[in-house]
Amino acid sequence: MWNKHFAIATIISILAIEGCNTHSHRSVSEPPSSTTTEEAPAQPMPQPVSVDQQEAEVIQSVNAEQFEQLIEQWVEEGAVIDVRTPEEYLQGHLPHALNINIYDENFKEQVLRHVGERPVVLVYCRSGRRSLKAAHILKEMGYQKIYNLRGGILEWMESGRPVLE
């Protein structure tokens, strides 16, 4: 999706620059200039960082293999959060996962209590939707490195990775 937004922004920028470089802004009755002035070459406009790009720097959705590697890498310093309900968590969860239900009215307080100031947060749910929502909340709370398990625990299990009960 980021690529689509980037492509659209690039095309709009090119069209805007090209539109500024043509002489179509002269009125019909205005005669063409008799003196030739050399125009400076168009300078590329600096592209602002899009919201999707900023988000991509903070929130990254990864597959099960990458998520497993991140768990191993950050097991001591990071936090793995299962944002499903307690009932879902008891049916099976990832190693090292804390259960903090995104539907709990005290979700943010629970995150602060159990995650604190850890530098990396890995988040997952059943299919990846709730965890992406949770990732946005975590970003709003100030967390800077958030990894979402794309496809959730379903993808994790389909890839043959262990689930604890």
Image (tube, rainbow, N blue to C red):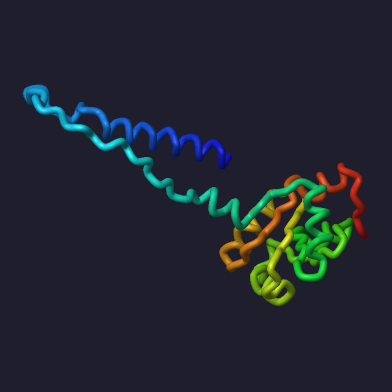
Which one is nearer the viewer's eye here, 84 or 1?
A: 1
Residue 87 lies, in percent from the top left, at 83, 60
Quadrant of the snapshot with the N terminus: top right
Quadrant of the snapshot with the C terminus: bottom right
Hey, which quadrant is residue 81 in on the image?
Answer: bottom right
Residue 124 lies, in percent from the top left, at 75, 55
| 94 to 19, vertically: above or below | below
In-image side of 62 versus 33 (left or right) = right
Could you tell me if residue 135 is visible in this image? yes
Picture mark count: 0
Q: Residue at x 81, y 63 (%)?
A: 86
Hey, which quadrant is residue 14 in on the image?
Answer: top left
Q: Residue at x 65, y 61 (%)?
A: 145
Which one is nearer the viewer's eye here, 119 or 35?
A: 35
In-image side of 116 versus 35 (left or right) = right
Could you tell me if residue 110 is visible in this image? no
| 154 to 114, vertically: above or below | above
Q: Residue at x 54, y 36 (%)?
A: 4
Q: Residue at x 77, y 49 (%)?
A: 152
Residue 146 lies, in percent from the top left, at 67, 59
In-image side of 57 versus 154 (left or right) = left
In-image side of 12 versus 53 (left or right) = left
Which one is nearer the viewer's eye here, 1 or 28?
A: 28
Residue 159 lies, in percent from the top left, at 87, 43
| 101 to 8, vertically: above or below | below
